[in-house]
Image: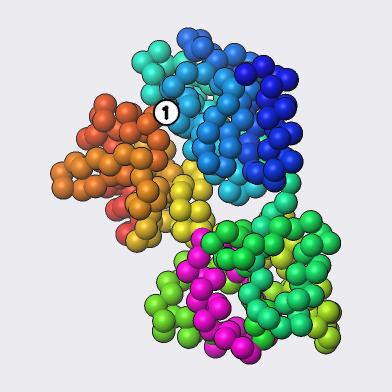
């Protein structure tokens, strides 16, 4: 696609309120078919339009773009097999092609509005929906569709609503409740079998202590917390395992074996947390199952499985120690 065609596609996606990421090649080292300035668009569903190099980079780029779309944060990718030292802020991936070229790409996610699910039929819930619409935040009907869930049940079905939200894929769960009430609900969630990684997503009270009294004031304070979560300013960063649970896919590189959960596996090639429910490739070595989210790491692993099996064992031993 030409640059003009890519811009037209971006405009069309914006008009339809569909998230996407613009990918730009910022550096190359031969041999590679990519060139500096080459661009592509990756949609939320993983379709790629444009050119950023051949098949050696495509799967890594699509996976990285979908992670950026899910997190809302831009990222830099480096695809290479050289011995360059790791650089802060650059996510490294192995080059699957025998050519061993190098490609560096900048991924910028775009989403015209960010999704919020508000659970509850209370006056505060209604006011929160009003504020969300005025702020241009897209309201969705289920927690599974949302990046943030705000629970505004205020005494009517609190536990059931909280359990539904925590079992969903939403990365952030906020609740209009006092700290004392929230602590009691956390204990109830533990009794219902909600694991700690999911409970870590709960923020309650939903916003700062501003002395709110009326439903409108309570909703306004809660929406301050919602906005902070959407802008990455919420209290505390998501742990790797929580982010993986939230997205159902590897959220970032640089993870450690200790970040594994029942639903994730740390890829020993690149350190990414891979969903064991939706892997792209599976390998079995010495009766142990290895999960991969892209072709690049899978191919690299198969070239020397003993090496990466040893890396995994060492990581597990380090964590257990």
Q: Position of residue 221 (x, y in %)?
A: 79, 74
* As drawn, 312 above or below 203: above
Q: What residue lies at 42% left-to-right and 56% top-to-bottom?
A: 259
Examine the rendered structure and indicate whether residue 291 appears above or below residue 198: above
**Region of the chain picked out in magenta, as a range:** 155-184
Q: Nearer the viewer, residue 302 or 144?
A: 144
Which is more toward the observer, 2 or 106?
2
Answer whether residue 174 is magenta in the image: yes
Quarter of the image that includes the C terminus: bottom left
Label 1: how many Cα within 10 Å (few below 14, some 14–19, many 20+): many
Where does residue 134 sit, x and y in percent of width and height? 84, 62
Q: Report x, y in % for residue 62.
A: 51, 34
**Residue 52 to residue 45: above or below:** above
In the figure, is residue 5 to the left or right of 302?
right
Question: Does the rendering let one see residue 275?
Answer: yes
Q: Secondary structure at mark 1?
A: loop
Does residue 291 lie above or below 98 as drawn?
A: below
Q: Position of residue 138 (x, y in %)?
A: 71, 57
Q: Residue furthest top?
A: 31
Rendered image coloring scheme? rainbow
| Residue at image point 48% right, 9% down | 31
Quick check: 277 left or right of 46?
Answer: left
Which residue is labeled 1 in the image?
94
Q: Residue at x 56, y 78 (%)?
A: 161
State the quadrant of the N terminus: top right
Q: Is residue 268 visible?
A: no
The number of numbered discs placed on residues in the rendered structure image is 1
Q: Is 103 left, or right, of 123 in this rendering?
A: left
Q: Quadrant of residue 223?
A: bottom right
Q: Nearer the viewer, residue 187 or 125?
A: 125
- The quadrant holding residue 279 is top left
Q: Is residue 165 magenta?
A: yes
């Amino acid at each position: 696609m030409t640059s003009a065609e890519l811009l037209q596609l971006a405009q069309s996606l914006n008009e339809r309120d569909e998230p996407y990421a613009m990918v730009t090649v910022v550096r190359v080292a031969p041999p590679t078919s990519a060139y500096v300035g080459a661009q592509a668009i990756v949609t939320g569903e993983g379709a790629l339009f444009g050119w950023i190099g051949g098949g050696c980079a495509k799967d890594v780029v699509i996976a990285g773009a979908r992670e950026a779309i899910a997190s809302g944060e831009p990222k830099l990718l480096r695809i290479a097999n050289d011995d360059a030292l790791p650089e802060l802020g650059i996510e490294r991936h192995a080059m699957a092609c025998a050519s061993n070229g190098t490609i560096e790409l900048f991924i910028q996610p775009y989403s015209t509005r960010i999704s919020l699910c508000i659970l509850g039929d209370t006056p505060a819930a209604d006011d929160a929906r009003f504020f969300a619409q005025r702020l241009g935040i897209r309201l969705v009907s289920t927690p599974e569709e949302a990046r943030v869930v705000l629970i505004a049940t205020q005494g009517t079905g609190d536990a059931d609503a909280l359990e539904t939200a925590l079992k969903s894929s939403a990365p952030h769960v906020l609740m209009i409740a006092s700290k004392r009430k929230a602590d009691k609900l956390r204990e109830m969630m533990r009794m219902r079998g909600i694991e700690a990684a999911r409970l870590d997503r709960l923020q309650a009270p939903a916003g700062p202590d501003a002395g709110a009294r009326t439903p409108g004031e309570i909703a306004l304070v809660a929406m301050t917390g919602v906005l902070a979560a959407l802008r990455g300013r919420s209290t505390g960063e998501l742990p790797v395992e929580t982010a993986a649970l939230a997205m159902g896919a590897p959220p970032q590189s640089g993870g450690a074996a200790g970040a594994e959960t029942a639903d994730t596996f740390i890829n020993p090639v690149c350190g990414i947390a891979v969903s064991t429910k939706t892997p792209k490739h599976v390998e079995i070595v010495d009766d142990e199952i290895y999960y991969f989210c892209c072709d690049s790491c899978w191919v690299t692993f198969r070239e020397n499985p003993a090496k990466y099996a040893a890396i995994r064992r060492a990581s597990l031993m380090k964590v257990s120690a």
